[in-house]
């Protein structure tokens, strides 16, 4: 595919990979928590550095690689001390470029530093929620957050979801946009492609019998016979708030805009 012309290497770095047995959407207790998962091709997991393990040591980009476990590409870095690590690849980063993770660094694509040292208006990704815990936000293909302002000990960001929130200015973030913005245009063309991704067929609840699902039964293409949609166990679904009252709640300035 034309989207993958940027990739420079087929085989992953062996020392940075491992194999995990598939769990097919099951939690540690064995219960299915994500439905319609199973099968799919084998995948090697790549260990990605989301933190600041190599502060102050420049690294050269050796390769840009595909990762079957995420939507974006990875860049393989070789540091001056000889160690190699994977990191999320920024858009427009090229093989041979040099990147740096430090308290304060040059404002260029791929450099990682504290938010307080990045000017207003810059795009960032792989952002920490708490200092020292590694990047937690804005890691999907083509995403980026924009810095609105610095005020006191906090930096205000506009996230890709349109949510406006404050985070500590001591948090690290990477300058630029996550690679592979074309990912959103890729369409799964046939059933086999979905099965190779580990996605099993999904059956509509309204196509089932009443004993199998709250939406089941009726003659022909009947609508669900209840005021609101429910899960197979009778709990309300669609539109139900799932976010728990976390301590970060107070740092949200503006909620994301709902799609109409």
Image (cartoon, rainbow, N blue to C red):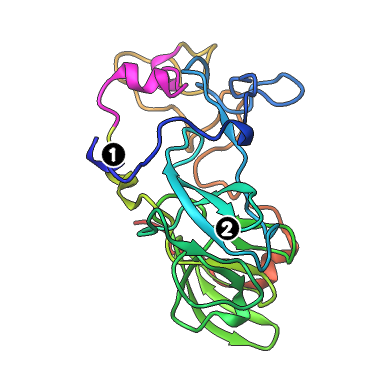
Image side of residue 162 versus residue 233, left or right: left
The magenta stretch spans residue 198: yes
CA distance separating discs 1 and 2 = 23 Å
User: Residue sitting at 69 percent across and 71 percent down?
Assistant: 250
Image side of residue 19 versus residue 11, left or right: right
Residue 141 locus on image (x, y percent): 42, 50
User: Residue sitting at 56 percent across and 51 percent down?
Assistant: 78
User: Residue sitting at 60 percent across and 47 percent down?
Assistant: 85
Q: Looking at this rendering, what residue extends furthest in the bottom direction? A: 152
Q: Total marks drawn?
A: 2
Residue 256 locus on image (x, y percent): 48, 64
Q: Is residue 147 above or below residue 206?
A: below
Crowd tier of the residue under label 2, counting other residues whose Cα lies within 10 Å: few below 14, some 14–19, many 20 or above: some
SS at mark 1 in the image: loop
In the image, which residues are magenta?
A: 188-208
Residue 175 locus on image (x, y percent): 49, 68
Pick the front one: 104 or 210: 104
Quarter of the rendering occupied by the N terminus: top left
Quarter of the rendering occupied by the C terminus: bottom left
User: Residue sitting at 47 percent across and 48 percent down?
Assistant: 62
SS at mark 2 in the image: strand
Q: Is residue 11 above or below residue 157?
A: above
Crowd tier of the residue under label 1, counting other residues whose Cα lies within 10 Å: few below 14, some 14–19, many 20 or above: few
Mark drawn on residue 186: 1
Pick the front one: 174 or 24: 174
Q: Which mark is first along the chain, 2 or 1? A: 2
The quadrant holding residue 34 is: top right
Q: Is residue 72 visible?
A: no
The magenta stretch spans residue 186: no
Q: Is residue 44 above or below residue 53?
A: above
The quadrant holding residue 172 is: bottom right
Mark drawn on residue 137: 2
């Amino acid at each position: 595919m034309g989207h993958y012309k940027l990739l420079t290497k087929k085989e992953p770095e062996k020392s940075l990979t491992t194999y995990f047995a598939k769990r097919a959407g099951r939690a540690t207790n064995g219960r299915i928590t994500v439905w319609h998962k199973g099968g799919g091709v084998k995948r090697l997991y790549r260990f990605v550095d989301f933190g600041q393990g190599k502060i102050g040591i420049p690294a050269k980009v050796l390769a840009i690689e595909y990762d079957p476990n995420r939507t974006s590409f990875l860049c393989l870095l070789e540091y001056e001390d000889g160690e190699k690590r994977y990191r999320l690849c920024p858009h427009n980063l090229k093989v041979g470029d040099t990147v740096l993770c430090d308290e304060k660094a040059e404002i260029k694509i791929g450099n990682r530093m504290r938010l307080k040292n990045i000017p207003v208006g810059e795009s960032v990704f792989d952002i920490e929620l708490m200092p020292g815990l590694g990047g937690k936000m804005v890691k999907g293909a083509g995403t980026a957050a924009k810095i609105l302002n610095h005020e006191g000990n906090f930096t205000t960001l506009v996230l890709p979801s349109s949510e406006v929130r404050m985070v500590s200015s001591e948090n690290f973030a990477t300058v630029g946009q996550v690679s592979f913005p074309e990912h959103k245009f890729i369409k799964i063309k046939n059933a086999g492609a979905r099965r190779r991704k580990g996605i099993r067929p999904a059956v509509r609840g309204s196509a089932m019998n009443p004993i199998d699902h709250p939406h089941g039964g009726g003659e022909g293409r009947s609508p669900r016979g209840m005021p609101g949609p429910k899960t197979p166990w009778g709990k309300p679904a669609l539109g139900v708030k799932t976010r728990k009252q976390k301590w970060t709640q107070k740092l949200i300035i503006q909620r994301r805009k709902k799609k109409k």
